[in-house]
Amino acid sequence: MVYKKISTRDNKFEEDYEEISFPKSEYASLQKRLDSENPIYSTRTREEKSAYSSGQLLNSPFGTLKVVEVKTFRSIKDHPFEKDLTDEQRERIKGKSFDIIKLVLATDV
């Protein structure tokens, strides 16, 4: 689903932002980080790998997010938050390359 958002910079046009989703079980912790003005990080595999780029704006359950950084990793042992992954997440990533995307709440959008 694509949402329409009016650009507050010039209010002359609407922009389509792609939607990014997160597991509902993570909503509370993600919202807490965003409320504290901290970035959130998300691991993306399969069809979402390489789908995001720095500067991209995305609709989310938390409002409009901005992609700050995208890093690609080839092994789960290189995952910067590997110790925080669930067994299910480890299994999904195992043997695949993946992206870690860093996101912040977008301002002046």
Image: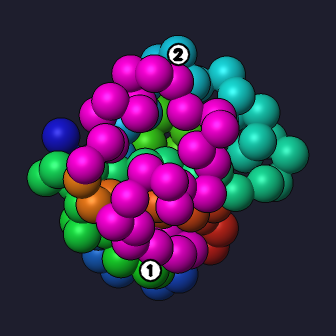
Q: Nearer the viewer, residue 30 or 93?
A: 93
Residue, disc 1: 54
Residue at x 52% of width, y 16% of height: 25
Q: Is residue 73 above or below residue 84?
A: below
Total labels: the figure holds 2
Residue at x 24% of width, y 69% of height: 50
What x and y, as percent, mark residue 40?
63, 51
Residue that protrudes farthest toward the top in the picture: 25
What x and y, as percent, mark residue 48?
22, 54
Residue at x 52% of width, y 75% of height: 69
Q: Nearer the viewer, residue 108 or 68?
A: 68
Tell me, yes or no, whether the highlighted magenta stretch contains residue 81. yes
Q: Residues within 10 Å of mark 2 (few under 14, many from 20)?
A: few
Query: Which quadrant, please, contains the N terminus?
Result: top left
Q: Is residue 103 above or below residue 12?
A: above
Secondary structure, mark 1, is loop
Q: Which tag, 2 or 1, sits closer to the chain's start?
A: 2
Q: Could you say which quadrant of the image residue 92 lies in? A: top left
Q: Give the residue type at disc 1.
A: Ser
Tell me, yes or no, whether the highlighted magenta stretch contains residue 98. no
Q: Which residues are magenta?
A: 66-95
